[in-house]
Image (spheres, helix red, strand yellow):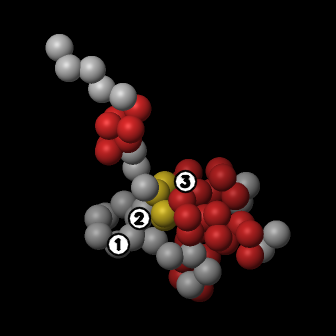
Amino acid sequence: MKEYNNENQNWFRPKGCTIAQAALMLSVSQKTIRRFLDRGLLHASKAIRKKLIPYSEIENFFERTR
């Protein structure tokens, strides 16, 4: 049996979060996150139906608006 370390298991780790998760992280409503996306304050991936906001984008937004 092959043994895997933690580095090999991170390939499936998501690179972003949904609008609901971003709202929880920033302590705002989902509607506010959608407004931020519409205004260009946050950027999301539009490749799939469910918008994914990269974690780095949320961290940058948090640092800019502190």
In the image, which disc is placed on residue 6? none
Image quarter (top left, top right, bottom left or bottom right) of the C terminus: bottom right
Mark 2 near mark 1, Cβ–Cβ under 8 Å?
Answer: yes
Give the distance between the C-alpha atoms of the residues marked 2 and 1, in whole angstroms: 6 Å
Residue 54 image point, x, y percent: 49, 63
Query: Looking at the image, which residue is at 66% across and 52% down?
Result: 25
Mark pair 1, 3: CA separation:
16 Å
Please provide percent x and percent y for residue 27: 73, 55
Between 49 and 64, the residue placed more toward the observer is 64
Question: Seen in the image, is 22 located left or right of residue 14?
Answer: right
Residue 20's tag is: 3
Residue closest to the eye, 46 or 58: 58
Horizontal side, residue 57 vs residue 18: left or right: right
The amino acid pointed to by label 2 is Lys
Residue 51: image tag: 2
Q: Quadrant of the N terminus?
A: top left
Q: Is residue 49 above or below residue 37?
A: above
Local packing at callout 2 (Cα closer than 10 Å; few below 14, some 14-19, many 20+) is some
Which residue is at a point 36% across and 28% down the rendered structure image?
Answer: 5
Q: Secondary structure at mark 3?
A: helix
Is residue 65 at least partly visible in the picture? yes
- Across and down, in percent, residue 18 comes to 48, 56
**Mark 1 vs mark 3: which is more N-terminal?**
3
Query: Residue 55's image quarter?
Result: bottom right
Would you name the residue on which mark 1 appears?
A: 46
- Marks 3 and 2: CB-CB under 8 Å? no
In the figure, 42 relative to 20: above or below?
below
Give SS at disc 2: loop
Task: Point out the tag, 2 or 1, that comes first from the N-terminus.
Answer: 1
User: What's the residue at 70%, 58% (across, down)?
Assistant: 26
